[in-house]
Amino acid sequence: MNVQYINPFIEASKKVISQTTELQSTLGKVYVKQAPCKSNNIVVLIGLTGEICGNVIITIGISFACKIASIMMGGTPVPILDEMAKSAISELSNMIMGTTATILYKNNIKIDITPPTILVGDNMSFSNDNAVIVCVPLVFEDGEIIELDISYIDKKKTK
């Protein structure tokens, strides 16, 4: 785990979520997660290409995703995770990753991101063979958590 790569994800996530929703988070204990990763929530998958390749899986509980979507849509009630709410969560994830890419670029690490893919379901399982998965939990005041599961390969080191 290279903090030079992980810290920009933390900085961008906290900054974008705070600016977009005014919700404040604290960093939970960062740890290496064992594959397969399991989720019963909403999952946003974004790929990384460039000097580091891999993916980021952002997981959010459905009720918390509805709350965030409501805030992003000007306080409109979001009782269920409909297509508009999914779009809001997808855009928030895209903003986080775009900000992360900008921070990395300022540190002379060039990456591109893929468009977000959003998945909702029960008992989802994700496996990334032979990859280290770094879990970055963001903990919010009401006990809700957003996790960023980051797995990557440093192409500079593999050359």
Image: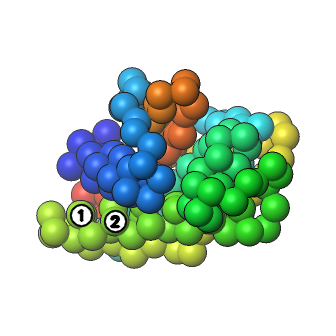
Q: Which residue is drawn at 22% across and 71% down?
A: 105
Give yes or no for contact between labels 1 and 2 (Cβ–Cβ under 8 Å). Answer: yes
Answer whether residue 75 is visible to the viewer in this image: yes
Q: Which x, y percent locates residue 153?
A: 39, 56
Residue at 59% of width from left, 63% of height from top? 74
Q: Position of residue 73 (x, y in %)?
A: 62, 64
Where residue 25 sits: x, y (%)?
Answer: 40, 36
Q: Is mark 1 on a helix, strand or loop?
A: helix
Element class at badge 2? helix
Along the line of sight, the residue nearer the viewer: 137 or 126:
137
Q: Quadrant of residue 46?
A: bottom right
Give the camera-side residue of 23 and 121: 23
* Colour scheme employed for the rendering of this structure: rainbow
> Which numbered tag is attached to residue 103?
1
> Which residue in the protein does label 2 denote?
99
Q: In this view, does 51 lie to the left or right of 66?
A: left
Left or right: residue 49 versus residue 119 is left
The amino acid pointed to by label 2 is Thr
Q: Is residue 33 above or below residue 72?
A: above
Camera-nearest residue between 88 and 131: 88
* Numbered tag placed on residue 48 in the rendering: none
Query: What is the spatial separation of the Cα atoms under label 1 and label 2, in whole angstroms?
Result: 6 Å
Tell me if residue 60 comes above or below residue 103 in the rendering.
above
Q: 93 left or right of 27?
A: right
- Classify 94 as above or below 69: below
Residue, x 59% and y 51% (percent of image)?
68
- The x and y percentages for residue 104 are 24, 64
Instruction: Indicate the amino acid at tag 1.
Output: Ile
Asked whether residue 127 is in view, the answer is no
| Quadrant of the frame with the N terminus | top left
